[in-house]
Amino acid sequence: MKKTLWFILASGVILQGLQAQGEGSGGNASDTGPVSGNFQVLWQSYSEDERIGAIVPPEKTGYNAYGNLRYNQGGFSAGFRYESYLNAVLGFPGRFKGSGIGYRFARYASPSQNVDVTIGNFYEQFGSGIVLRSYEERALGIDNALDGVRIILRPLEGLQIKTVYGKQRFDFDDGLINGNGIVRGIDGNLDLNALLAEKGGQDWKTKVNLGANFVSKFQAGGTIASDTLVLTLPENVGAWSYRFDLMRKGWSAGAEYAAKINDPSADNGYTYRRGEALMAHLGYTKRGLGISLHAKTVDNMSFRSDRDVLLFDSPINYIPAITQQHTYNLAATLYPYATVIAGESSLSAEIFYNIKKGSALGGKYGTNVSVNFAAANGLDTTQLSGVEGIVDGYERSSWGFGPTKFVRDFNVQISRKVSKNFKWKYTFYNLEFNTLTTPVTTTFKGMVYADIHVLETQWKTAKRESLRTEFQLLLTDQDKRDWGTVLAEYTWSPHWFASVLDQYNYSNPNADDRVHYLYAAVGRIEGPHRLSIGYGKRREGIFCIGGVCRAVPASNGFEVNFSSSF
Amino acid sequence: MNNMSRLVGLVALITFWCTMPHPVFAQNPSRATNQLPEMELKDMEGSMVPISSLYESGTPTLICFWATWCSPCKRELNNYAELYEDWQDETGVQIVAVSIDDSRSVHRVAPYVNSVMWDYTVLLDPNKDFARAMQVVNVPHTFLVNGEGQVIWQHNNYSDGDEEEVYEQLLNLTP
């Protein structure tokens, strides 16, 4: 209670301080001068609840806070992020401790943008990120920012060359802690239309982008013993990729091929097999219609700056999942799919279509329909034996599907506006999910077959007020069996909102586990400032963003969330 | 203190905190704050678009950060789409929808945008470089920018009816 009071008062003091700064500078375009920033505070209290498995840590509360400040002047910018974990909210890496600077940088970009130099921390992505992506997903506690130097050059119109050299953020203990591995890389991207602008390239109907990159990591080596063999660990491991993207009228097509030399690691059981990945996409779109096809095979492409770590630690690259990222609670958090890091073959197809307004099916306002299908299997491989088996593990016979099914995800969504004040959206999912290969639950090992129905309604009750509801039903004979969810959210635009959510595992085989997870929240929004307070039970589950998922423990208590930017 | 009395106490505090005067919240539309950063982003055709080109016509620009997996973001931009023609006639505003979809979903952006028939400029920010420079904590986050590239007003989150507030801010900015 005291902590909450302090938090609320401190937030008020900070904001009053910002106001004083604004008034002091005369309220013109230099309101906050060349300084911008944001704050975010997450506070949770915990109560014990044996039925849902919620525990109370010794400190009884969790507290994460972040403050970014950035100074911009012409081409120069510099900034830092102050972070505080006192102690980290459950579900975040528990080893994040204390308060201090977690990110700092200085950057100069010439007015023409031909030279762009950053020292300190930076985020970067080469191509799709299959070889290098440093990024922050704060809600998941993921931050693999590079700490070193980045130089971006544009020597010719249409040609961009990026070089990076640094260590990766690994931990936080009263400040940033980098891992030991060194990452260095170079990426080139060629916009052929811009390069050949003098020959009319910008007027070509076909747009062509080409790219290639090479990334190497260094980590002190040694030897490992495996059976009767003593194997030397490679200290320098290189990975690279080539990519192209073509666009012509409504068509788009592209592919990226990536490879990696031998990289024995905890992810691959310290085998010496090469890594490879191939991703391709084809799309067509015109007004009212969009079609998208993808194929992806990833084989042993886990790439970390520390060969001995797992899960979310020190990834250099990013391997996106093939499935759609779902937004409704039951579909998004009970059986979310993430790429199986050892390897998988996958494909997806998606169609978006608008049924014209005024037609019999489209109704007065038109109707939007989308259909999505994604499938992933294990690789088509043969296990090797003897010394070859110890060293390389297996060999892959093709880029196609192997026999082990990982996931099938089919979903259809129909959304329709019925009147000026009422609209609805219905979504159906059919899911086959292998919990042996993607262990998102501890209570069942095998294939889960589930149907999910979601009906969302939105009713505008007054000029600035609306009621949104969600009715969700997950039906399965496996795992914890059927779930139902009801959500009601009322908003008074532009400032207030209140919501109530109830999840109920009504047919759990164990009657004691048929629990209502009731959670209520209220909040206020003022421009870029948002404060919300919630209370209730949150179930143990998987929280995902961008294909990366983290297990979140069950909890019961208050949650206060404040964010502000200026 | 039991949980219920804690809840009542906190609700009372939050009500007090939110209703006490916060001049910083009352964003005076005549007061500009930050200048848009100088950067380039790719559009859906793969061409690089300088941020400065978004406001060079001198008319207001509404920059909306969104993602294909973000339901309130899509509600916001779909609702604006119904009003866009009128807003343009009255205020000359241009809407720029900046997608933060990463490589998992960035290829869904163009099919989705065309299927719902948005007439916006759509830019791609797959590693959130622009979002970071604009201090975006979460999406949706909307910025109103004047003809000189200065952020005049911003709003985090979206609820149905927020378009009324946006419209008022646009009118305030229009001579």
Image (cartoon, coloured by chain):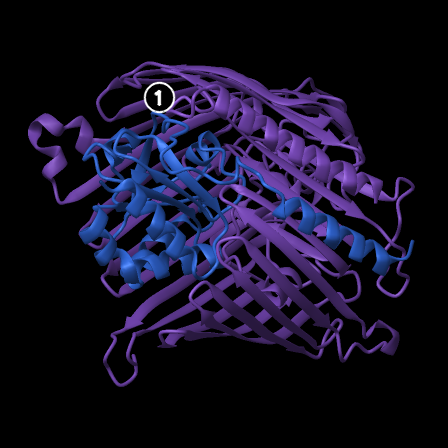
- Could you say whether the residue bearing mark 1 is in a helix, strand or loop? strand
Q: Residue furthest front?
A: B21
- Hue used for the chain lettered B: blue
**Residue displayed at 53% across by 22% down:** A21
Residue A479 against residue A5 in the figure, above or below = below
Identify the residue at horizontal 55%, vertical 53% (top origin): A344
Q: Nearer the viewer, residue A17 or B45?
A: A17
- Decide: few, some or many residues near mark 1? Use Cα within 10 Å; few <14, some 14-19, many ≥20: many
Where is the N terminus of chain A found, in terms of image quarters? top right
The image shows a total of numbered marks equal to 1
Relative to residue A232, is residue A202 drawn left or right?
Answer: left
Q: Chain of mark 1?
A: A
Identify the residue shown where x is 70% and y is 77%.
A482
**Chain A is shown in which shade?**
purple
Whether residue A363 is visible to the viewer of this picture, yes or no, is yes
Q: Amino acid at mark 1?
A: Ile
